[in-house]
Amino acid sequence: MSAVVEPSPPQRRGDVHLRRLEAEAIAIMREVAAEFRKPVMLYSIGKDSSVMLHLARKAFFPGKPPFPLLHIDTLWKFREMIAFRDATARRLGIKLIVHTNAEGVRRGIDPVGSGSALHTQVMKTAALKQALDRHGFDAALGGARRDEEKSRAKERVFSLRGVSHDWNPKNQRPELWRLYNTRLGEGQTMRVFPLSNWTEYEVWEYIAAEAIPVVPLYYAAVRPVVARSGAWIMVDDDRLPLNPGEEPERRRVRFRTLGCYPLTGAIESAAATPAEILAELRDTRRSERQGRLIDGDEEAAMERKKREGYF
Amino acid sequence: MPDSGDPPAIQRERDLLRFLTCGSVDDGKSTLIGRLLHDCAMIFDDQLEALERESHRFGTTGEAIDFSLLLDGLEDERQQRITIDVAYRFFATPRRAFIVADTPGHEQYTRNMATGASTSDLAVILVDARHGIVSQTKRHAFICSLLGIRQLVLAVNKMDLVGYEGRRFAEIAANFSAFAAGLGEPAVRAIPLSALSGDNITRRSERMSWYRGPALLEHLETVETVATAGDGDARFRFPVQWVNRPDASFRGFSGTIASGSVASGDRVVLAGSGRSTRVCRIVTFDGPLDRAGAGEAVTLVLDDEIDIARGDLLADPDNPPEFVDQFAAHVIWMSEHPLVPGRSYLVKIGTRTVPATVTALKHRVDVETLAHLADKTLGLNEIGFCNLSTAAPVAFDPYTVNRDTGGFILIDRFSNETAGAGMIAFGLRRASNIQWQALTIGRDERAGLKGQTPAVLWLTGLSGAGKSTIADLVEKQLLALGRHTMLLDGDNVRHGLNRDLGFTDADRVENVRRVGEVARLLAEAGLIVICSFISPFRAERRMVRELTRPTAFFEIFVDTPIEECIRRDPKGLYAKAKAGGIEHFTGLDSPYEAPQAPEMRVATIGTSAEEAAAAIIDELRRRRII
Ligand SMILES: Nc1nc2c(ncn2[C@@H]2O[C@H](COP(=O)(O)OP(=O)(O)O)[C@@H](O)[C@H]2O)c(=O)[nH]1
């Protein structure tokens, strides 16, 4: 046992800060595995999910992550996302649960006709609650970050949810040191966010440093798009009704976040590698959520959705 | 995955500084953070646009941007113009990444400040140059020092409003130094600034040429942290978080190294057991490591198969941690329900969770004067120095030496809320000084001679519910059956054993604790003990249940509605209480928490006391107690 702190040996890559973020996330995942009866990891197929999955493999190595993945499929995700999802689960041999709100499908809810608010409420928020209840999951790991949005900045790493999955921002447990209170009352569940302290930039640095595969939609390519409310919407299949006179154009674009394709705006970009994306992010003047059409309406939109149980 | 090309040009050896900001309302904290984020290009155009919209709606700065709206994330906060909760902000410069815990200034949110401080290396304490050091400033400095922050920045803001005057600044800085000296001499850096006009924030200000020190950001970028100075606790500490056992061929212990470092081949000791073993491999996804240091999340494979579980602590065998079941600690109370000595909570320390009670509140600290005050309970946001006793020994280091192995949280066992946070000062050597005397004759031998099974029958219910009458009848019947019994009655013990106790929550808890101890002794003597106590709180009934283990514990809820008790009022107490003659009367101005899962419930409406007693005797038979 040596009494001095040795300098980091050369075998470890990346900078000190990224390694600390990595270690923190791993510790949080292990805590979930150790303290909960039946945890699950939310898998949204986005870059944060890719990072989460990578971290989960590290946390339990040489074992596999001791929880399944859950994808809430709204049936309006980009086709490339679904292909990536299935290939990833197959490649890693991890159990993947896909859940769709069947009642929403019966009611014919879709992002174009029903509007983004209703679609999100039924096909994402309600669908997630259904899946958690059906399987009896008591903890759900998610990839949300505090830098994404200001109500998130106030959320705990271990975020308690009531019987109907609601979030009460005014009654959050204080979270000190690295000590997480994981106790649940009857019917309560926990949402857990291991990437709480990461920024978008660090997510990309980590993807670059660890060569983590992500859906190719994050990288610039020429894609068919139409301009709507100041954003480029990709015509991913023939379900997107075109407005009179609207004609898809081919533009070099990429996505900063991924969701339901009619609700997700692309940005014009030539960044085709993680390094180029990092360079682009250093210059950008727009936040990550610019491409999300659901938040624009009102500043408190996200907090409301979260109170109702949105991730 | 496309080729990732060259790694980003900047930030190769960037490290992290976590700090918190605190100050009274309106000292300019939000303006300061907003300015830092803005000047470090962390605010995007679309966020600025949203901010402008909101500034017009809720803002207080007229046409200018109100930065506090950027920070107050919750709807209530924006509407009421207050900050409720800790928020975390992120920004980076080429030299360092920063995580800022932005904590509110109101007194009632002390708990949030402690939360932010618990993970911070440094605190920026704001004062308004016009007002200087106020009581809030002292409170914040004290909490920071209690949570182990050794680096303070005294940010003297609004210098523009005092004409950028060097004298005023020097006066405030000197005042603060005098106070801080009483806090164990933290390193203090005082900086004069104006958050509004940007003086000395990211760049040194020409308007204060008399000031020769660094601008705030410059200081934050270069200040030594525990990590950069390498002066953290060097003794190896590894709380076992997860036993990694994917199949029979692999068994490793996963966790995050709390302090020190470990190399393969090193000897480590299982704290408290005296048993040591050797680390044969340090496993990670990225390949085995020769050595791993503080903060790294690794998996250790050990030489021999000693029994190790989550909650254990592996340590340097030459410098092991203390291992005791009683210790003294500062506790910051964070719950609306006060801390009551004698009540049972859960302590989570490292990866270990054990039941614990606060055995004594030595004093409460007045956070403004630092004076020690006598008190019986701790309320929300109060700080006290306490003795705690855990149900099993725990490994720890003093908090001042090691935050990870010396800090703990207290969890309420019913609401599950995080009720408090504690910093261990020192172990109380009671665990090793007062040994259990090993006795030849035990409970079973004594009970065997009497030919009976000892048990504790605990009757709980409102005053006038019928507990004492039923208890008396049960004892008579047991006596008739040839059982050796003892009856403890609430009113009777208050004449002797507990005559020093009143009826406050704290005294009620102590009352029940003492009776529990006596019941345990009597059960050890082989008796069937009948206890008749209002015992209004679930927590204490549970404590007695645990205390008397492994003796059979039989909770009997004598369930009589309050209206009926008031109607009966055998001792005239309800009438007296209602007339204002008795305070803290259960059911009236003091709560009764009905049992949720008692072994037995007897409703007394429509049943006679004899029938109730007979039902209890039947149940004891059914459970083979008699
Ligand atoms: N003159 C002047 N006013 C300031 C300065 N910093 C903040 N203020 C003003 O003080 C008020 C309170 O600031 P705010 O940042 O909301 O304070 P907080 O409550 O500590 O977050 C606002 O009206 C600010 O514009 C400063 O350096 N100089």
Image: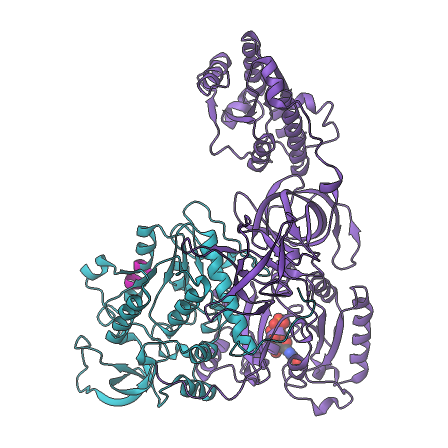
Chain colours: A cyan, B purple
| A270 in relation to A291, above or below | below
For ligand 1, the image quadrant comes to bottom right
Q: Main secondary structure of the magenta part?
A: helix
In the rendered image, is residue B344 in sight? yes
Residue drawn at (59%, 21%), measured in percent from left and top?
Answer: B444
Quarter assignment of residue B341: top right
Give the quadrant of the C terminus of chain A.
bottom left
Could you tell me residue B408's position as x and y percent? 62, 54
Quarter assignment of residue B210: bottom right
Could you tell me residue A86's position as x and y percent? 27, 68
Is residue B4 rendered to the left or right of residue B102? Answer: left
Residue drawn at (48%, 64%), measured in percent from left and top?
Answer: A26
Could you tell me residue A202's position as x and y percent? 48, 77
Residue drawn at (47%, 52%), measured in percent from left and top?
Answer: A35
Is residue B579 rendered to the left or right of residue B500? Answer: left
Q: Is residue A107 magenta?
A: no
| A287 in relation to A72, above or below | below
Could you tell me residue A85's position as x and y percent? 29, 69
**B519 vs B577, nearest the viewer:** B519
| B72 in relation to B108, above or below | below
| B623 in relation to B120, above or below | above
Is residue B334 rendered to the left or right of residue A39? Answer: right
Q: Is residue A126 magenta?
A: yes
**B364 vs A297, nearest the viewer:** B364
In the rendered image, is residue A301 in sight? no
**B40 vs A207, nearest the viewer:** A207
Q: Give the range drawn in magenta.
A: A121-127
Q: How many labels does the image show?
A: 0
